[in-house]
Image (spheres, rainbow, N blue to C red):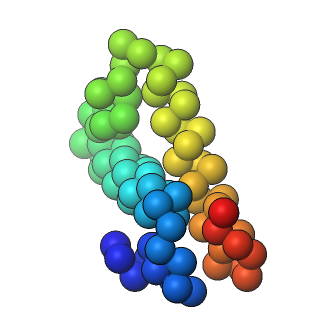
């Protein structure tokens, strides 16, 4: 985890949050894939935030933005 957040010497809080969001998103997608083969809905973000659909969608948007931020950073841009 730490090496992800310190890539290129950047240790900003924003990049650390982005790392956590990317990990949450990746684990969630992995569980969704496993759930498909088990015939179950294993979307943990939905399970936790189903009663708050607006918040659930904001979490998905933040995960996507975190991934885009990391793509820009890895392609030579700045993280923040």
Asked if residue 77 is positioned above or below residue 69 in the image, the reply reads below
The answer to whether residue 55 is left or right of residue 2 is right
Percent across and percent down for residue 17 are 45, 56
Which residue is farthest bottom? 8
Residue 30 in sight in this render: no
| Quarter of the rendering containing residue 43 | top left
Q: Position of residue 65 (x, y in %)?
A: 63, 50
Q: Pick whichever, 52 or 5, lies toward us.
A: 5
Quarter location, residue 72: bottom right
Q: Quadrant of residue 20?
A: bottom left
Q: Relative to 72, say whether 76 is above or below.
A: below
Q: Position of residue 39 (x, y in %)?
A: 28, 36
Res 49 visible: yes
**Position in image of residue 48 (x %, y %):** 29, 27
Q: Residue furthest top?
A: 51
Q: Image point 59% across, 39% down: which residue?
A: 61
Q: Is residue 22 left or right of residue 43?
A: right
Residue that appears at 30% across and 27% down: 47
Query: Relative to residue 48, is residue 6 depicted above or below?
Result: below
Residues 67 and 14: in front is: 14
Answer above or below: position of 5 versus 53.
Answer: below
Q: Residue at x 56, y 43 (%)?
A: 62
Assign the C terminus to one quadrant of the image: bottom right
* 1 relative position to 57: left or right: left
Which quadrant of the rendered structure holds the N terminus? Answer: bottom left
* 6 and 54: which is toward the camera: 6
The count of marks equals 0
């Amino acid at each position: 985890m730490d090496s992800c957040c310190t890539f290129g010497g950047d240790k900003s809080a924003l990049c650390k949050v982005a790392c956590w969001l990317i990990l949450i998103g990746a684990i969630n997608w992995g569980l969704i894939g496993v759930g498909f083969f088990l015939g179950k809905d294993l979307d943990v973000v939905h399970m936790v935030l189903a009663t708050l659909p607006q918040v659930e969608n904001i979490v998905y948007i933040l995960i996507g933005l975190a991934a885009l931020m990391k793509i820009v950073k890895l392609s030579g841009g700045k993280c923040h």
